[in-house]
Image: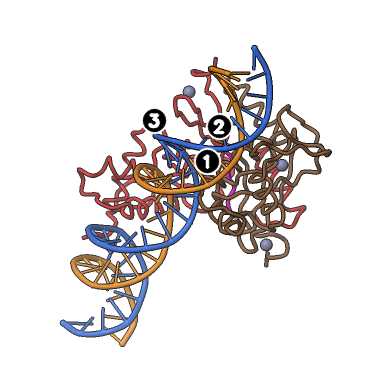
Chain colours: A brown, B red, C blue, D orange
Amino acid sequence: MNAPVSTPTSAPALTKNQSLVFDVLTRSDAPMSAYTILDRLRDHGFRAPLQVYRALDKLLEFGMVHRLESLNAFVACAHPESECCGQGHGHGHGTVAFAICESCGHVSEFHDHEVDHRLGDWAKAKNFKPAKTTIEIRGLCGACGA
Amino acid sequence: MNAPVSTPTSAPALTKNQSLVFDVLTRSDAPMSAYTILDRLRDHGFRAPLQVYRALDKLLEFGMVHRLESLNAFVACAHPESECCGQGHGHGHGTVAFAICESCGHVSEFHDHEVDHRLGDWAKAKNFKPAKTTIEIRGLCGACGA
DNA sequence: ATGACACACGTTATAGCATAACGCAATTGA
DNA sequence: TCAATTGCGTTATGCTATAACGTGTGTCAT
Ligand SMILES: [Zn+2]
Ligand SMILES: [Zn+2]
Ligand SMILES: [Zn+2]
Ligand SMILES: [Zn+2]
């Protein structure tokens, strides 16, 4: 009874908990910490952090959610579904960057091919095998900037 | 008696605690968490996390130490002291990137002008005012890679 | 000198983020 | 049917970071 529920749409089937977490993140206009998500889902039966973390682990694996390392928080993926450097797993997007407004909390997700290549070249030159790349710009968005 | 001690060399004068923390980080060949630093300094009178965090805050401000967001850990700056995009504060280096080996823990700090500009251009186009940029590549270093 | 101020420090307590370890239930596939 | 896998719920624990309080010490203007 806890198995993922298949849908007629695309994307991997989500379990109930995964759907709940994903919905909360999707509706939010700012990153959320795992504990904030937990609080939003108390009414839906969530009682412990692990319920959230387990769902997040899967959503991250599916590429439907991103973790913001500099914030210890999570956002729903904002990709237009299909991007240039599809790289195999899940949603299929390569390295992505985030611009995080420290005033209003808004996050812009974007991909810059050039940056990606440039870092790839450095890695190749140093014989470094990249697994996951984090790019986060903290600052003030257009609406909040002086 | 707790004021910074002036030295004949360059760089800002460090207090005793700041020096101790910086020395530990400098001697380490891998990033250290604040609590690991604390443990290393018990013999020197450190008893509480705040002693470490306060020293780290200053060292970060001076640009002598960097925080690795994806690791919640800290490293001594590995710059050759003077770099291209000096940007005012402290040591005077612009945005820097880190390649972190997930096997041996070794960290390479580098600066890529092109990447820096590219992200700057994106920000300018979006009217986003960057304050601090994080770039971290996790993977396997040349020595550890298959 | 004396007071105001800034700053480093030490201590205790608390807040916030993340995982370990256990056992149960349902699904899958041999 | 049996074993392997996956998701789930619960309790306890560990790691990371800061709040709030008070102390001592230099600096500098009065
Ligand atoms: Zn995305
Ligand atoms: Zn904003
Ligand atoms: Zn540096
Ligand atoms: Zn290595």
Q: Which amino acid does label 1 sit on?
A: Ser
User: What range of the chain is rendered magenta?
Assistant: B132-136
Report helix, strand or loop for mark 2: strand
Residue at image point 71% right, 29% down: A89
Q: Dot 3, how many residues are within 10 Å of its Cα: few (below 14), some (14-19), or many (20+)? A: some
Q: Which chain carries label 1?
A: B
If the image is split into quadrants, where does the N terminus of chain B sit? Answer: bottom left
The tag on residue B70 is: 1
Question: Do tag 2 and tag 1 residues touch (Cβ < 8 Å)?
Answer: yes
* Residue in the foreground of this view, choosing between D18 and B128: D18
Report helix, strand or loop for mark 1: loop
Residue at image point 48% right, 31% down: B107
Question: Do tag 1 and tag 3 residues touch (Cβ < 8 Å)?
Answer: no
Q: Mark 3 lies on which chain?
A: B
Q: Mark 2 lies on which chain?
A: B
Looking at marks 2 and 1 on the same chain, the residue that comes earlier in the sequence is marked by 1
Q: Taking A127 as reference, is C8 left or right?
A: left
Using the rendered view, name the quadrant where residue C30 is placed: top right
Looking at marks 1 and 3 on the same chain, the residue that comes earlier in the sequence is marked by 3
Residue A15 appears in view: yes
Same subunit, tags 3 and 2:
yes
Residue B92 appears in view: no
How far across and down, in percent of the image, does residue B31 sit?
A: 42, 36
Marks 2/1: CA distance? 9 Å
Using the rendered view, name the quadrant where residue B40 is placed: top left
Marks 1/3: CA distance? 18 Å
* Residue in the foreground of this view, choosing between A7 and B141: A7
Give the dominant element type of the magenta stretch: helix, strand or loop. Answer: strand
